[in-house]
Amino acid sequence: MTEKIILPNIIKSLRVLLIDDDIFMLNLLEEMLKSLGFTDITTASEGRGALAIIDNTHLRPMQLLICDLKMPGMDGIEFFRHLAARRFCGWMIVSSGSDPRILKTVGNLLQAHHLRFLDIMQKPIRTSDLLSALTKLKDSVPNATNSFDLQMLSPAEIKTGLIEDHVETYFQPQISLSDGKITGAECLARWRHPTKGLVPPVAFISVAEEHDLIDDLTMAVFRKAMQCQGEWTRQGHELKISVNLSMNNLERLDLPEQFADITREEGVSIRNVMLEMTESRLMSNLAASLEIITRLRLKGFGLSVDDFGTGYSSMEKLNLLPFNELKVDRAFVFGAAGDAAARAILDLSVQMGRALDMRIVAEGAETQEDWDLVTASGCDEMQGYIIAKPMPANEFMYWKKHWDASVRDGVITPLH
């Protein structure tokens, strides 16, 4: 049955690196991939050898890694750290016979390293397991042959791009679970490169942070988001727009005034602006951030704890901060209907948010099962591919009008 599923040619053309100290497993995985149509496959028996291959293939970088955890010399965990330091832009699948709870932690580690984690395959691996993991690439790989040849933008490219207005804003809608109506959208930054095309945040955010360009980038994104929101407000659309902040932005003492000035200039009500901050970095820089966070809230901006559940927040710590929204990370939403531990974290997050009088948004919902689970959990709002993918501003408003019409007709189920 599984062999009848045909992978797109762009996926089968990916350059694959297999890493496992078990020669039998390497040969087995290689044969499985070949049976699925892959032809460009390289193997390594441990982490150091894999890094040497990656370092020597700059002109034809590896695009998909399938990596074991327990290996002699450099194991998988240490290998991931080195990949993160190299800002590896390909996708990763983990294969291991370790305890499922360990594997779940590994998945969280890969996300914390900002690596493009795809799936975990439990050994012994079957072709159907591999195919299931690979099919997740269908929505992730753009229709371009160089999609995985993405290189990090240089500081010079970012400086030039900010001057030449290469920053674009996309919007992913959020809906109320009580009535299905659109409550707002998260603004997501993209970069329109003259030769590389549309570049995702992974290729420029960290570079901007490391080279003191993040304030200019954030201001550019915030300004564009407010321009869109101002125009939508004048058209009669009352929406909450969420904009992501870097923790580096919170070192800028005049940030509250700068944001307030922009909202006023663009005709936007501050109460309709939500500023998102990632939980893990927020909690590690709490003292340095408190002043700016508090002043932003005093101005009237909404404050959201993003990716909740992936960091180290406690109710005590959250109670010290003036946040009014909690966003449950997709790791505890997508597929959580079949994962008791993820469901427990989702339930606890809702309880914590309720106790602190915070609005609760579940992000990353992709299936009907996710929709049903989040609805039953008591979350206030939901965001995810089951509703819509991020869209340019003009497409977002076109989509919104159709969604609004469906809600008026009594349809508050996914339209994907």
Image (tube, rainbow, N blue to C red):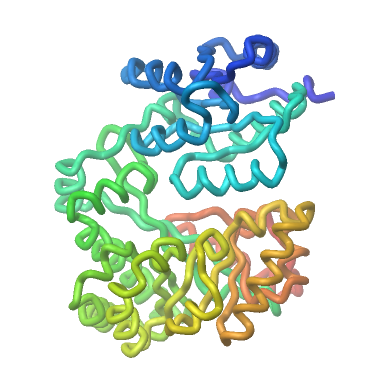
Which residue is at a point 70% across and 58% down the rendered structure image?
A: 342
In front of the other: 386 or 17: 17
Residue 304's x, y, as percent?
Answer: 46, 74
Looking at the image, residue 201 sits to the left or right of residue 26; the answer is: left
Depicted 273 relative to depicted 214: above or below: below
In front of the other: 10 or 33: 33
How many marks the image carries: the answer is 0
Which residue is at a point 53% across and 15% down the rendered structure image?
A: 45
In front of the other: 71 or 119: 71
Q: In the orientation shown, which residue stands out farthest toward the front?
A: 73
Q: Is residue 369 visible?
A: no
Which residue is at a point 56% across and 23% down the rendered structure image?
A: 71
Q: Quadrant of residue 28?
A: top right
Depicted 313 relative to depicted 213: above or below: below
Looking at the image, residue 121 sits to the left or right of residue 256; the answer is: right
Quarter of the figure with the N terminus: top right
Q: Quadrant of residue 246?
A: bottom left
Looking at the image, residue 100 sits to the left or right of residue 258; the answer is: right
Q: Is residue 27 visible?
A: yes
Looking at the image, residue 250 sits to the left or right of residue 395; the answer is: left
Residue 169's x, y, as percent?
Answer: 37, 57
Residue 100's x, y, as percent?
Answer: 71, 42
Residue 221's x, y, as percent?
Answer: 30, 62
Depicted 297 relative to depicted 69: above or below: below
